[in-house]
Image: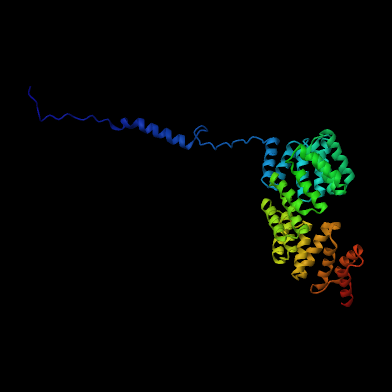
């Protein structure tokens, strides 16, 4: 077959028509971009709704915090339980105990009263109110509430321990010992029974036995900072073992750093003669709670020992006004002397405290000396 090699086929010209599909797609994309329908626009992520926590969950949080030594967190969790379960006496009774540890007696009684009002036959509520009344010195009322609780649960170790504490406070030590024996038979590891055993030994003047009993209580409840403070008191007041006392106070601060524990440590340092360190620790206590009266008074005493009379007068004035009748005579006349020795002297303010000290003891030497100094100025 002959081939004409000079022949060249002609290409077809398709023109613009072959691009129409691409152009159409581009137009549609531009329109969609300019006028985005709701289904094409990016939607913000809807927040996940957190389920409402139950009172039981907060109650568990409170117990965990309490046994971790975090009293503030425990109190906050109990408050949440009260908010969610206003008819539940348990968190109120627990708060009463915590306020008692923090030495806030009015608040402790208030919580316990609310618990008993909600549930007059609840053992925990009655126990809380019995102990609050005992600490307030209302021994007959305390005894009645504890006996009511005992009728409901005759073998309740905590109730038996509270009865022992009440009888110890009123000086009936044989009856107290009997209740403690019953409490420990019911529960050998009951913290309050062990603590009140130590308290009974302390009242009897057997401080070594009291330390051993406090050690047992601490082993049962190492998260209770008040047990370390009680142990330290035996070393300091009873045995004059200041180093061991300070060690126990430091352990209390390690368990829960608060105005109460720092005040205890600062006062221990003051009594050990370390006035400079006492001032430092007590200032920290006052920073945590500017209205905690005992810390203010102890800070004033430590400042006075360091001859900082100006600051001592300020702290003692405020602290003594807060603690009221719980002030000791040496704290009262020291406030008066601080006003005399400061520059310039303020005998008008000094006389208020000096006369109050003389009402307690008309033969108080420091108070009489202060009056004499004021007469010469």
Which residue is at the far bottom? 376
Residue 92 appears in the picture as rendered: no
Residue 297 appears in the picture as rendered: yes
Residue 373 picture location, percent across and down: 87, 75
Q: Is residue 361 left or right of residue 75?
A: right
Residue sitting nearer the eye, 26 or 308: 308
The answer to whether 341 is drawn above or below residue 119 in the figure is below
Q: Is residue 5 left or right of residue 172?
A: left
Which residue is at the far top? 1
Residue at 21% over, 30% down: 11
The quadrant the C terminus occupies is bottom right
Residue 352: name its quadrant.
bottom right
Residue 236: name its quadrant.
bottom right
Residue sitting nearer the eye, 35 or 242: 242
Residue at 85% over, 66% down: 333
Residue 376 picture location, percent across and down: 88, 77
Residue 86 picture location, percent across and down: 77, 37
The quadrant the N terminus occupies is top left
Residue sitting nearer the eye, 357 or 177: 177
Residue at 90% over, 44% down: 140
Residue 152 picture location, percent across and down: 83, 33
């Amino acid at each position: 077959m002959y081939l004409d090699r000079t022949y060249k086929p002609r290409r077809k010209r398709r023109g613009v028509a072959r691009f129409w599909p691409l152009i159409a797609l581009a137009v549609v994309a531009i329109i969609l971009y300019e006028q985005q329908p709701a289904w094409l626009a990016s939607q913000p992520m809807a927040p996940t709704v957190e389920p409402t926590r139950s009172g039981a969950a907060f109650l568990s949080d409170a117990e965990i915090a309490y046994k971790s030594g975090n009293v503030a967190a425990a109190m906050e969790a109990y408050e949440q339980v009260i908010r969610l379960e206003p008819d539940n006496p348990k968190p109120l009774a627990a708060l009463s105990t915590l306020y008692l540890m923090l030495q806030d007696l009015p608040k402790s009684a208030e919580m316990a009263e609310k618990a008993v009002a909600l549930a007059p036959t609840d053992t925990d509520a009655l126990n809380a109110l019995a102990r609050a009344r005992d600490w307030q010195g209302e021994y007959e009322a305390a005894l009645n509430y504890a006996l009511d609780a005992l009728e409901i649960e005759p073998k309740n170790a905590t109730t038996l321990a509270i009865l022992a504490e009440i009888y110890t406070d009123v000086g009936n030590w044989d009856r107290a010992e009997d209740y403690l024996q019953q409490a420990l038979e019911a529960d050998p590891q009951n913290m309050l029974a062990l603590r009140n055993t130590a308290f009974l030994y302390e009242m009897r003047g057997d401080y070594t036995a009291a330390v051993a009993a406090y050690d047992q209580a601490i082993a049962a409840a190492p998260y209770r900072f008040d047990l370390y403070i009680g142990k330290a008191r035996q070393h300091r007041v009873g045995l004059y073992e200041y180093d061991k006392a300070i060690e126990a106070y430091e352990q209390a601060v390690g368990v829960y750093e608060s105005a109460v524990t720092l005040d205890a440590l600062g006062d221990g340092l003051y009594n050990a003669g370390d006035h400079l360190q006492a001032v430092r620790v007590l200032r920290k206590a006052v920073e945590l709670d500017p209205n905690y009266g005992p810390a203010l008074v102890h800070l004033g005493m430590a400042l006075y020992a360091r001859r900082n009379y100006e600051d001592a007068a300020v702290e003692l004035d405020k602290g003594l006004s807060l603690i009221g009748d719980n002030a000791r005579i040496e704290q009262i006349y020291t406030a008066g002397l601080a006003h005399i020795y400061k520059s310039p002297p303020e005998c008008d303010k000094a006389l208020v405290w000096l006369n109050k000290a003389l009402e307690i003891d008309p033969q108080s030497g420091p108070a009489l000396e202060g009056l004499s100094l004021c007469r010469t100025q």
